Amino acid sequence: MAILVTKRSRVVVQGITGKSGDFHTSQMLKCRTNIVAGTSPGKGGTTVNGIPVYDTVRECVERHQADVSVLFLPARFVLDSTVEAIRAGIKLVVVVPEHIPIHDMIRIRKYAKAHGTMVIGGNTAGIISPDEANVGIIPPIAFKKGRVGSVSRSGSMTYYVADTLTRSGYGESTCVGLGGDPILGSTFAEILPLFDKDPETDAVILVGEIGGVYEESAAPTIRQIRKPILAIVGGRYAPVGKRMGHAGAIIEGEMGTAQTKLNALEEAGAYPVMNLSDIPKVLQELIGPPKG
Amino acid sequence: MAILVTKRSRVVVQGITGKSGDFHTSQMLKCRTNIVAGTSPGKGGTTVNGIPVYDTVRECVERHQADVSVLFLPARFVLDSTVEAIRAGIKLVVVVPEHIPIHDMIRIRKYAKAHGTMVIGGNTAGIISPDEANVGIIPPIAFKKGRVGSVSRSGSMTYYVADTLTRSGYGESTCVGLGGDPILGSTFAEILPLFDKDPETDAVILVGEIGGVYEESAAPTIRQIRKPILAIVGGRYAPVGKRMGHAGAIIEGEMGTAQTKLNALEEAGAYPVMNLSDIPKVLQELIGPPKG
Amino acid sequence: MRLYEYEAKELLAEHGIPIPKGFLARSVEEVTSCAERIGNRVVLKAQILSGGRGKAGGILFASSPQEAAEKAKSLLAAKIKGYQVKSVYVEQALDIAKELYIGVTIDRVNYKVVLIGCEEGGVEIEEIARRSPERIVKFSREIDEPFFSHDGVAFAKQIGFSGKALQTVAKISKAAVNIFYSYDAKLVEVNPLAQLQDGSLVAADARISIDEDALFRQGQLQKLGVENRHEEGEMTGREKQAREASIPYLDLDGDIGMFPGGAGFGIAGNDLIIDLGGQPANFMDSGGGPSPERIAKMLMLLEENPRVKAIFGARFGGVSRCDDFAKGVILFLKTGKLTKPIAMRMTGNMWEEGLRIFEEERKQNPHLFDKIEIFGIETPIAYVAKRAVELARAEERKTD
Amino acid sequence: MRLYEYEAKELLAEHGIPIPKGFLARSVEEVTSCAERIGNRVVLKAQILSGGRGKAGGILFASSPQEAAEKAKSLLAAKIKGYQVKSVYVEQALDIAKELYIGVTIDRVNYKVVLIGCEEGGVEIEEIARRSPERIVKFSREIDEPFFSHDGVAFAKQIGFSGKALQTVAKISKAAVNIFYSYDAKLVEVNPLAQLQDGSLVAADARISIDEDALFRQGQLQKLGVENRHEEGEMTGREKQAREASIPYLDLDGDIGMFPGGAGFGIAGNDLIIDLGGQPANFMDSGGGPSPERIAKMLMLLEENPRVKAIFGARFGGVSRCDDFAKGVILFLKTGKLTKPIAMRMTGNMWEEGLRIFEEERKQNPHLFDKIEIFGIETPIAYVAKRAVELARAEERKTD
């Protein structure tokens, strides 16, 4: 099965005619991702990498039953394009661009929630389910189909975790990059339950990092998850960062260091892991040796 | 019974400490309108005409179960104050001020519809149910409790219709002034069904006038009304007015003269009446002589 | 409140809608230098607050600065649709292949904001709406519902555009919606939106109408020099005089001076007089809560109107109180200028006080009331109207 | 992106929030004349992009223009919290009875906009939030949900205001929300909002932080002269140099130069090195899709850092491709400046191409690769990290 993206996903690339959209479409196609269409207003009727281009997402949904979209567009167009995808009925939007205005991300989140759409990113490397689909910019080299999921705030850590899992024989069911922007479309709390329900996932690696409160706010969800969750939090030795005025502290309280995050995650039932190389050992204890 | 405002209405006056709010509160009280509270931010704790003043409408609702509000405020504050009343749970808002920005009135209408609140006005003389309540600025002199309702786009015509009804012995159940502003909170289509359901109303006088499309758009509703409706439309001899660009014509089509309005109303089942003095004769035919 | 074409175009350009090169000129010399700056063929457009300029001779073409100067001379001396032409917009003449229509306005029936588009435009747009409504594309939206770029794309696509023009029309429609909201507009109309021979799109003419009642929050328009104004081109002198006193007033053809209360009875009163065989000389509305001074001014307008033979007055005091009304009438009577008979009814809020004021004055100066008949709630309004018609007939007989 | 106090106050004033009389001064002379214009007692506030100025000596009082001049002299020569003081805001000293707090920010957990108020304010506000959270009033709203005047009234009432102050706090809170939306702010903080002895309210200090990523649509801020800036007061020279090249970079205390890919592994890589007994000399991030030039620049920063003994490189090509990475590394190697050993791993998108580029260069100029060990997917990253630690230890032994 895998989660979010599978062989059956019907992917539309928004911004397919741009340099980046064009290149990564070819890369995603190499992973046999089922890309059915692309959009670029004013370029409807052309093709890119053999994929038909339309002016609107609605056409992609109506003619190709697209259900997943991935964005390769400048940050300033992300709000518009995401809302377009949501309105057209797309159920998963993967936002690759970074530096999206914060207010826009909150608008996107509100819109997505109201319409039951999941938005991943911005500044995400994407989502990969090895042998099924690769939606975003994830280099497939380190990935191999397996039974461990990962969800990470960092693209590079997604790669290194997969590198570790593949190397140790566990492989991955699905790896989700939440994205590196300060305000994210989806967080750990929304992804973990999907892994819990996925029959092909036995354990999940959660990769957090200093800053923000996404790890802490995932704690209540982690308590509900039955599958083992391994938690890594980057920045254990990071110097204490600057804070954003008093208001942030009033709202978020005493959160945000790697230690408070690890503590919160462990308290909620996750297994803290210090380094990537410790993952196989801990997995072995929790779910036994890799299968196959 | 009467409609919209009765003895049981619990009225709050928004802007009660202003010159106009103060004066008309005293006038409404003379008609024994059940005014329970007034508002004026920053003046909470004082009294006007013996009525307690609060900073917010919410307090008036919580402490006095207010359910009707009437506004005496400059036009620029009407959006804010109406939304405040709606949010506080008020179910009928009577907007006396005129010259309310058109965009604001559309915002008000949207907000009111979403919350099931009825807004009357702007630029309305108000609503009077003789011997029950008088909410607004209607001079009670020509009014007498009876069994004919009226709904009018013009304050002065409300008075003259009542003058006619009272003089002929029919009297009035409730008289509703829709208001003279170009965009109204409620229209004929919303008021007529209330009269139809009111056991103490036997017939309704609808008073329209040239301009806009409120009469034409009431036609479908009029077809559903079982009680007789007498229709007067002012401006039968008015010179053809100027129109607002092409867009208005595209949206509204061929509507807006007194004759098209009278035709539309008659076709929908209303009885056209040319002059006020014809009303008693037509009423006599439709509902018989006045009672009592 | 309609904006001048050059103001509307300034807003369009500010919001990214392409407009032809053009400059405002207030004299023949300015027209010449503008025409020189533009080069080639120019069009001179009289800046008046009215549509239908073209048919009325307010739009002239010129192939050279010399020709522009000649034509500007006559244009700047002309009166078009009642307006004295005070300025001319000198614009590059366009090589138009096709005229389109884009407009944003309010749907007053459904309380929506509507974006309207058509692949045909110009002066024929209303005719198209009537004849082939299916060719008109309408996007109806809740107020304040964000209008996204992709909405503009969908709109342009539905009108029938593709390729580069699709993107341009999408942008223009989004910009038009932005203008609508930014300036509290009642109407934003780009008509015609011209498609040139090279395929590019440009706003050949524009009409923007602002809600006067929202001007208080339109600081930017004030900065642009836009102020409250009316389409007064076709106003009579008396209408302008009334407007200066903030009295809604319209001259009509009859001989009975109408001196009513609110606008509603102002309109219905005219019907009443005509049904009784009279002819109103005017429409008038006192506005809400008029001062005694304004009441007096209203009467003075009628007294000074030579058409008026008799005056029909009606006051049902609501927000406008009878005491203020009575004071105003007396203020006028005391000028001693009244020569015309008045039949008038007064009732409503503070009528006792109004009556008392009249009675007191009558005791002091009974002669002031020689030509005025004042009725109260006991007399039906139709009787008072009939009396006014009789008075006018009597005056007519006198002059015969 | 934090605004200077004087910029923040300009925005406050523009939105109707009362601010004390004050002027910006860039020299002792200007301070004197500002103090003269204000009269009475003034406060001199160092304009730096950092909080905690008061405790750091950045806020001084003066009873006369002479005293102001003296204090300005030292203030304009001072470095406060790492910032050279370049300008001073000269403001009327306030007779404060009470300090309040009003702020608008984003609740990142719930994706809401939150208005925060407290009848106590100043530097103690965080302490209050911790100790007595019930005293903090929070109004949490959906993004773009209109904030009405009556919301402000309800908010002010909940904080505990009545009468005239209720109206003022209502207005200020509404204005703060307006500012938050108008300028794509991350934070709008009026703290302290000072209640003076006469009961009036005035914004004694203000902090506004703008979302850099939304600056492209903040034309008005650009007009006000606000441009993208960073809080660089405490930056080292190398950090400033990196920032000029748009490379996120932070100096640390160790001796291993960190040359990673994305920010995520940039952070985790530091943990890895420390766990392996090493000490990173820096934090660095290449940003998305770095050019070969930027890659070369990153290496140069490490080469030029005298602390650095060895370099740990890691590239997992995603949006940043390995071919560009290899080109950048070679660009640097070709400068001939490399003196430090590098242990580096490269894999990910276009790794074959990257490897090919290295191999070709090695054939041409084998000596360029003397100090660099390049690993691929076959080698675990922890091994490469360990190798970097070993190399640093070896260098250390050499210098001993």
Image (cartoon, coloured by chain):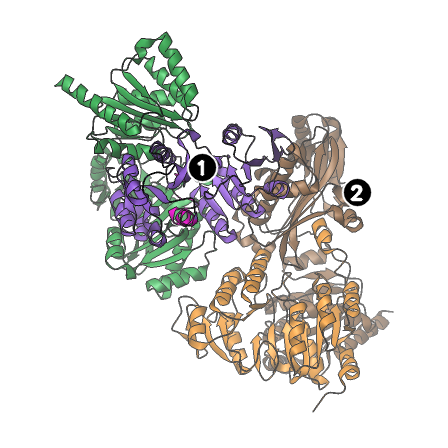
Chain colours: A orange, B purple, C green, D brown
| Image quarter (top left, top right, bottom left or bottom right) of the C terminus of chain B | top left
Q: Seen from this angle, which residue lies furthest bottom?
A: A292
Q: Secondary structure at mark 1?
A: strand
Residue name at image x 27 percent, y 48 percent: B266
Tell me if residue C174 comes above or below residue A9 in the rendering.
Answer: above
Residue name at image x 26 percent, y 53 percent: C125
- In percent of width and height, residue D306 lies at 77, 63
- For label 1, the crowd category at 10 Å Cα-Cα, with few meaning under 14, some 14 to 19 and many 20 or more, is many
Can residue C87 be seen by looking at this rendering?
A: no
Q: Which residue is mark 1?
A: B128
Q: Amino acid type of disc 1?
A: Ile
D313 or B53: nearer the eye?
A: B53
- For label 2, the crowd category at 10 Å Cα-Cα, with few meaning under 14, some 14 to 19 and many 20 or more, is few
Q: Which residues are magenta?
A: B179-197
Residue name at image x 58 percent, y 80 percent: D353
- In percent of width and height, residue C276 lies at 21, 31
C259 or D88: nearer the eye?
A: C259
Q: Is residue A71 left or right of residue A53?
A: right
- In percent of width and height, residue B39 lies at 58, 36
Asked whether residue B192 is drawn in magenta, I would say yes
Q: Which residue is mark 2?
A: D55
